[in-house]
Image (cartoon, helix red, strand yellow):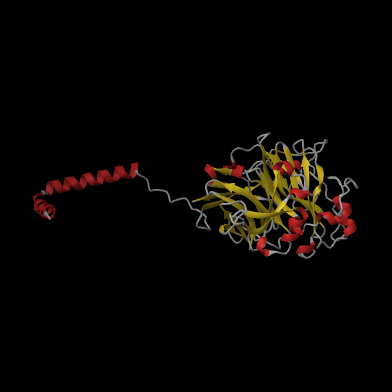
């Protein structure tokens, strides 16, 4: 109260001269302030679609004329996917693309190609500096697809996931019978090839074959396909159709569990079912019967339960309780994020790019995050699919994450997306 009465008492003591002087000083100060303190800039506009996401930004195309690397110089003007793999022995990142053309979806069709990046600054987009090429210097396929017309035998072979184990590269893929068939009938089988020279050549691991018994193709044709070499040469292997039935594992995306196991996220039926999971010891990755499949149950100590080989595959067939997420998945990627402290599996579902999270690699994946919807301006088309990333494409301990995502129309090249979490 004293301060209030003091202020009232002092006001009449101010002379007219002092008031004028004060006014002049204020005018001078105002001019100085205008010079020293410009109008603050508006806060940077951010795009966010989820409580976990601070900002989403499209950094441009990865392939094509508009990409930083201008990949049309490598005869790569239209492609999709781009499964990333950091090859630690070379300190380079490989990107495994799907069907690839000279432009859009025409000219020099290759079922898959491998781009290589040494880009250590992803904040301005992803630059591919080279592609795995033939001896003549032309960008070529990793493994060959037959390119038969739909419904004859095999249209193409598409990568579904890759991993590097002590310098040996493993690429999982599926053989497509007919794109126009119903979802469960489209694929012939899922398989695996390996390279011991960092992608220059590939060889089939015949034992790693998961046949789709729902395929519209004939048993005879599929038996021929699964025994071909990576370059479509006949009778490279001698495995039997009946020994490799595996509907749920026709699409496999591997990730290192950092516990001695490689974990494999599985999809069966093209974009028609929820994902499942299996695991295999690193040193036994090439043995079909050593793969063990999570059966959706836990023991009394809360340890997840698995069944090996053919028995495991037979058990999980048709059981929704073995799905990690109930809604159908498309092409997917799996990785650990240290910032979120979660294992993440990412896909495009319901026309949105979604990430499902769990503290444990086996699950449950009951936390979810919408990175962005297909209706957004991030990628301004509705045909979004295949959001792909790895742990090595993270910054600030995982607070910033980069991913590729594909579109079918009106352009056929992956975009490079930057996601920043709150």
Which residue occupies the foreground of this view, 366 or 290? 290
Which residue occupies the foreground of this view, 327 or 16? 327
Q: Residue 204: image x %, image y %? A: 82, 45
- On the question of residue 330 being in view, the answer is yes
Report the side of 312 relative to 388 (left or right): right
- On the question of residue 80 being in view, the answer is no
Q: Residue at x 80, y 41 (%)?
A: 202
Q: Quadrant of the N terminus?
A: bottom left
Which residue occupies the foreground of this view, 84 or 316? 316
Q: Residue 261: image x %, image y %? A: 67, 45
Q: Residue 380: image x %, image y %? A: 62, 58
Which residue occupies the foreground of this view, 10 or 188? 188
Q: Is residue 3 above or below residue 88?
A: below
Q: Quadrant of residue 330?
A: bottom right
Q: In which quarter of the image is residue 332?
A: bottom right
Q: Which residue is drawn at 62% across and 48% down?
A: 335
Report the side of 359 relative to 241 (left or right): left
Q: Quadrant of residue 94?
A: top right
Q: Residue 365: image x %, image y %? A: 59, 57
Q: Which residue is drawn at 86% across and 50% down?
A: 239
Q: Extreme front residue here? A: 300
């Amino acid at each position: 109260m004293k301060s209030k009465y003091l202020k009232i008492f002092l006001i009449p003591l101010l002379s007219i001269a002092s008031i004028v002087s004060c006014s002049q000083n204020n005018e001078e100060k105002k001019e100085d302030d205008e010079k020293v303190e410009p109008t603050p800039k508006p806060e940077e506009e951010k795009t966010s679609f989820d409580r976990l996401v601070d900002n989403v930004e499209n950094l441009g195309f990865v392939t094509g004329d508009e990409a930083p690397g201008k990949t049309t110089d490598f005869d790569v003007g239209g492609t999709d996917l781009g499964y990333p793999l950091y090859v630690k022995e070379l300190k380079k990142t490989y990107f495994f693309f799907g069907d690839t053309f000279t432009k859009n979806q025409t000219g020099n069709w290759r079922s898959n190609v491998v781009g290589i990046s040494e880009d250590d600054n992803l904040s301005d987009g992803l630059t591919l500096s080279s592609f795995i090429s033939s001896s003549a210097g032309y960008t070529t396929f990793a493994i060959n697809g037959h390119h038969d017309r739909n419904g004859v035998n095999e249209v193409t072979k598409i990568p579904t996931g890759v991993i590097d184990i002590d310098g040996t590269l493993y690429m999982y893929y599926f053989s497509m019978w007919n794109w126009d068939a119903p979802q469960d009938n489209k694929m012939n089988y899922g398989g695996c090839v390996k390279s011991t020279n960092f992608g220059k050549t590939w060889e089939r691991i015949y034992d790693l074959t998961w046949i789709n018994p729902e395929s519209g193709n004939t048993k005879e044709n599929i038996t021929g396909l699964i025994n071909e070499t990576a370059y479509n040469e006949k009778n490279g292997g001698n495995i039997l159709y009946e020994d490799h039935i595996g509907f749920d594992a026709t699409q496999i995306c591997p990730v290192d569990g950092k516990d001695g196991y490689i974990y494999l996220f599985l999809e069966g039926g093209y974009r028609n079912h929820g994902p499942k999971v299996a695991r295999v010891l690193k040193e036994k990755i090439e043995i079909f019967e050593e793969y063990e499949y999570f059966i959706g149950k836990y023991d009394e100590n809360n340890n997840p339960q698995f069944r090996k080989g053919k028995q495991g595959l037979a058990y999980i067939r048709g059981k929704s309780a073995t799905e990690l997420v109930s809604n159908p998945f498309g092409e997917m990627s799996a990785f650990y994020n240290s910032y979120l402290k979660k294992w993440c599996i990412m896909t495009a579902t319901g026309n949105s790019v979604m990430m499902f999270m769990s503290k444990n690699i086996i699950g449950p994946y009951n936390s979810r995050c919408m990175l962005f919807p297909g209706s957004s301006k991030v990628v301004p088309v509705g045909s979004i699919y295949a959001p792909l990333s790895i742990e090595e494409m993270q910054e600030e301990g995982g607070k910033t994450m980069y991913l590729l995502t594909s579109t079918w129309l009106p352009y056929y090249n992956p975009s490079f997306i930057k996601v920043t979490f709150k």
